[in-house]
Amino acid sequence: MSALQAVVSVAIAALVLVRVIGRQVTGSPVTARSLVLMPAVLLVIGVAGMGNVLGSASTGALLLFGADVALLVLVGLGRGASVALGERNGTLYQRGTRLTLLLWLLTIALRVGFAFAGHLLGVDDRLAGASIALSMGLTIGAQNVAIWWRGQRLGVPMAVPAARR
């Protein structure tokens, strides 16, 4: 991965995290769009970005990537379980807790840790760099699946975006 690609990847990841974590800390209504849009966009970008790298990835890079993704999905499910859900104005409302924030820090630490592990093991870092958007989409998607499932169990309807009311 070139230096420019690394900077762009890190910048995109930082912007996504600021937006996602910021909304969770301040709280927000739960809408179908808020649960689907960000992870879907990241997954599309991630799959497109990995297309050129995946075929030439070594077995070690693929194993490291698989372990990284598996752990990030599990942590995403944990974050989704840690979000406080309630009813506000008759619709589902979410707000991250201290545990949610700690699990976000764990998410970042895992991603950085796997990148360093790959470097120390001499694994080609092109797959790790190309998979940032994909892994972020998967972990946020897992979190949102947990939030959706918990919201369904509460029986509180999701909010409808203001433009569609």
Image: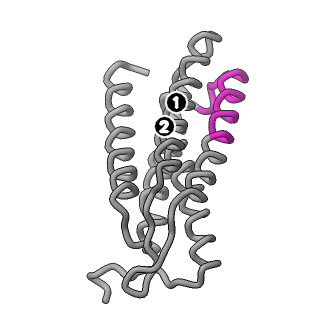
**Residue where numbered disc 2 is placed:** 105
The residue sitting at 52% across, 60% down in the picture is: 83
User: Where is 39 relative to 91, above or below?
Assistant: above
Lateral position of residue 47 relative to residue 23, left or right: right
Local secondary structure at mark 1 = helix
Mark 2, other Cα within 10 Å: few <14 / some 14–19 / many ≥20: few
Of the 4 image quadrants, the one containing the C terminus is bottom left
Lateral position of residue 100 relative to residue 63, left or right: left
**Magenta segment boundaries in residue numbering:** 54-71
- The foreground one among 12 and 148 is 148
The reply to whether discs 1 and 2 touch (Cβ–Cβ < 8 Å) is yes
- Image coordinates of residue 77 in percent, x first then y, are 62, 54
- The foreground one among 121 and 92 is 92
Lateral position of residue 122 relative to residue 104, left or right: right
Q: Which amino acid does label 1 sit on?
A: Ala
Local secondary structure at mark 2 = helix
- Image coordinates of residue 53 in percent, x first then y, are 55, 30
Q: Which amino acid does label 2 sit on?
A: Leu
Checking the image for residue 3, the label placed there is none
**Residue where numbered disc 1 is placed:** 109
The residue sitting at 63% across, 25% down in the picture is: 57
- Image coordinates of residue 130 in percent, x first then y, are 49, 33
Number of callouts = 2
Lateral position of residue 71 relative to residue 100, left or right: right
Mark 1, other Cα within 10 Å: few <14 / some 14–19 / many ≥20: few
Is 58 included in the stretch rendered in magenta? yes
Q: Predominant secondary structure in magenta? A: helix
The residue sitting at 60% across, 79% down in the picture is: 154
